[in-house]
Image (tube, coloured by chain):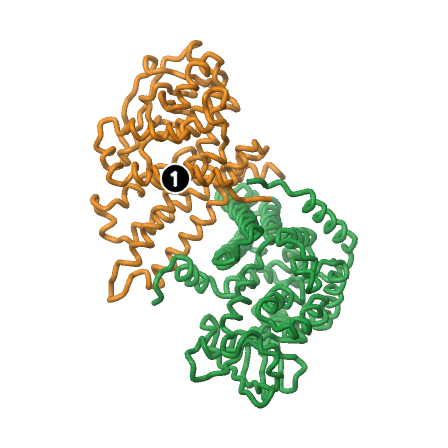
Chain colours: A green, B orange
Amino acid sequence: MDFDESSEDAAFRDEIRTWLAEHKQEMADTKRVPGDTPREEYAKFRDWERTLFDGGWAGIAWPKEYGGRGASLYQQAVFTEEYAQANGPERINRLGLGLLAPTLMIYGTEEQKQAHLSKTLSGDEVWCQGFSEPGAGSDLAALRTKAVREGDEYVINGQKVWTSFAQAADWIFLLVRTDPDAPKHKGITYILVDMKSPGIEVRPIVQITGYQGETGFCETFFTDVRVPASNVVGKVNDGWKVAMATLGFERGTGLGSAAAFKALLDRVVDITLHEPRYDGIAADDPDIRRRIAQGFIETRVYELNTKRVLSKLAKGDALGSEASLSKLYWSEMDARLFELGNDALGPRAELARDAADAESGGKWFGEYLYARASMIYAGTSEIQKNIIAQRVLGLPRS
Amino acid sequence: MDFDFSEEQYMLRDTVRDLLAKESTPAEVRRMWDDEKGRSPERWHKLGELGVLGLNIPEAAGGAGMDELDMVLVLEEAGRAILPEPLLEHAAVGAPLLARAGTEAQKTEWLPKLATGEAIVTVGLAGQPYVQDAGADLVILEQDGELHAATQDRLTLTPMPSVDRARRLSKVTAELDEATLMGPAGTNAAWAFDHGAAATAAELLGIGGAMLDMTIAYAKEREQFGHKIGSFQAVQHKLAETYLLVETAKAAVYYAAYALAKDLPDAQIHVSVAKAYASDAERRANYESLQIHGGIGFTWEHDLHLWLKRGRALEAQYGDADWHRRRIADWVYAQR
């Protein structure tokens, strides 16, 4: 057991820090809270992806043959950590880089890899995810958007929902039903669709943050959309397996994110020190102090567990149940930390973002709501518990 | 960075696990509950032969000269097997404390015997009202700002039976003087407290893991309403949440051992994280295991209560979760 960083990793960290420091102004100009992105500003985020790519910071752990650095997952985590500490902007193509690309590396054809990996890396292809439907949320396999084969094409009809980044995206990775008669998990196909295809309509949905006319998620409608059959990833009717790989990557993207939660805890400690109460400050309240300590414990234990997982991955172990454990852990911790911040803020917590006194320049309450969202997206906490119970502990399905 | 143990460390763990699976069975622990002394010299001797009793004693003094990282997995196994003997007090705290803070004469006289297990040492720090195995050959006591190492002729013991009848607790009054003096308590007593807390966290990890394993196995076989109870979502979610806590506690406990072994400047905060988190994780396993076993778990005949009682006792040992949270909070705010 050894927690000292190798000289190579330390040099890598220095290189990142230097680069991020040089781009401080650009980051400040691009920075927004997650989802709080006016459509007119998408171009800025695309430019930023390009800047990261030019700096060699897109696809750090990607193999060199796909244009990546071929660095270790540990170094990828170091980047995530330093990026969070530098308060880096939202990554508009995080679904493409973090979810679609690693899925293609496993299941994609050579042509698909050639067509999409380098463009995804450079930010020229921004991706969104077409999984959930109005009738298929936690029960994802109940999806009904259908694709019918006609010659060399599939014709797609149906509706997807909660498609984040749909308005910004060039492409969508989509789950469709190709065999309506098969058992529900066996008739699903994973297919890549150009968002410029005729018949696609994107309607933004206003989220509970109330940020009108900005991203967040959308409904995406498909009416007779024609897609080349060569865009199927994996085998036809075998898309569930491919989708599970994507979801594994989605749930496992927390590696290196401990720094963000430590930064959040620091903000909350600051609030407890400065926020006046009826008497004194929150930091004098033994119950608040106890919860701050618990927040410290949880962020620390999270950090140690991400290191433990990274260490296992470095030895060639696959990311298995850790993804569900990690996702369940961090999402609930995130919400608890914000809730503690709310309690310390007291009456100031409810202030809207245009109120002069609102915390963090008005961003606080929206960030708090996104923490609540994290317990829902990428599989709710309850779904993660089902997965842990059945696949890790081997308990029987009901 | 490498967050893993060495082959040798795993081998030692497996050897101890195999030994205790044979020698510290529930039936054997029950036998100790009813035994006058509550201890098996044969089992102690076998642990001595494996080298774990002198694991953290320097080689020059007859020990194995290994560190807290070598010890942590052994302690986890002792917890899993609810070992009756005072491995924690002797090998993880008492003996290395004497090696660190004893006089030359004390070390020369005692360490070789402690290393083999021929003599047993236990510890009573200030604020610790009852001493485990106070009938030991040597009892290290913190009193009036000093550490002393006393033999039985200096001590008066009042037994305080525990609900966990394998724990043998006593109130101790002692006649201490220059002849028993090790030195000022100071940092050495604090060192012993942190080692006790980290070691207790390791045992709690094993206890929580054992209760969870028993309960998962039970949920897979017990049927109600015509189905295995482990197929019910209410039961599945309890077990998933408990598993999450017990599994994530490992990293905290192992890192605390690392921090102590490397003598990191903020080691005591890592120890507090481990003790608070492992205590909470074990508490959750403690609750859910009885709840899921239901009525059968409430019987004397079922073995579950052997773990329930040991776990509950160790939650309070060397500072409970709230005590450690208070220490963390004071530290967090002192950084500002």
Q: Is residue A334 left or right of residue A67?
A: left
Q: Is residue A128 left or right of residue A372?
A: right
Instruction: Point out the image quarter for the C terminus of chain A.
Output: bottom left
Q: Position of residue A48 (x, y in %)?
A: 74, 63
Specify the quadrant of the image occupied by residue B93: top left
Q: Tell which of A266 and B282 is nearer to you.
A: B282
Q: Residue at x 49, y 78 (%)?
A: A237
The furthest residue to the top: B178
Specify the quadrant of the image occupied by residue A115: bottom right
Q: Is residue A187 left or right of residue B120?
A: right
Q: Position of residue B255 (x, y in %)?
A: 52, 40
Q: Disc 1 residue type?
A: Glu
Specify the quadrant of the image occupied by residue A226: bottom right
Q: Circle 1 is placed at which residue position?
A: B77
Q: Position of residue B176 (x, y in %)?
A: 39, 13
Instruction: Label 1: state its secondary structure.
Output: helix
Q: Position of residue B148 (x, y in %)?
A: 43, 17
Report whether residue B322 is seen. Answer: no
Residues packed near mark 1 inside 10 Å, few (<14), some (14 to 19) or many (20 plus): many
Instruction: Point out the image quarter for the N terminus of chain A.
Output: top right
Q: Tell which of A111 and A379 is nearer to you.
A: A111
Q: Tell which of B51 and A337 is nearer to you.
A: B51
Report whether residue B44 is seen. Answer: yes
Q: Chain of mark 1?
A: B
Q: Residue at x 59, y 49 (%)?
A: A262
Q: Residue at x 70, y 48 (%)?
A: A13
User: Please, is residue A126 above or below residue A72 in the view?
Assistant: below
* Count of residue discs: 1
User: Please, is residue B314 above or below residue B230 in the view?
Assistant: above
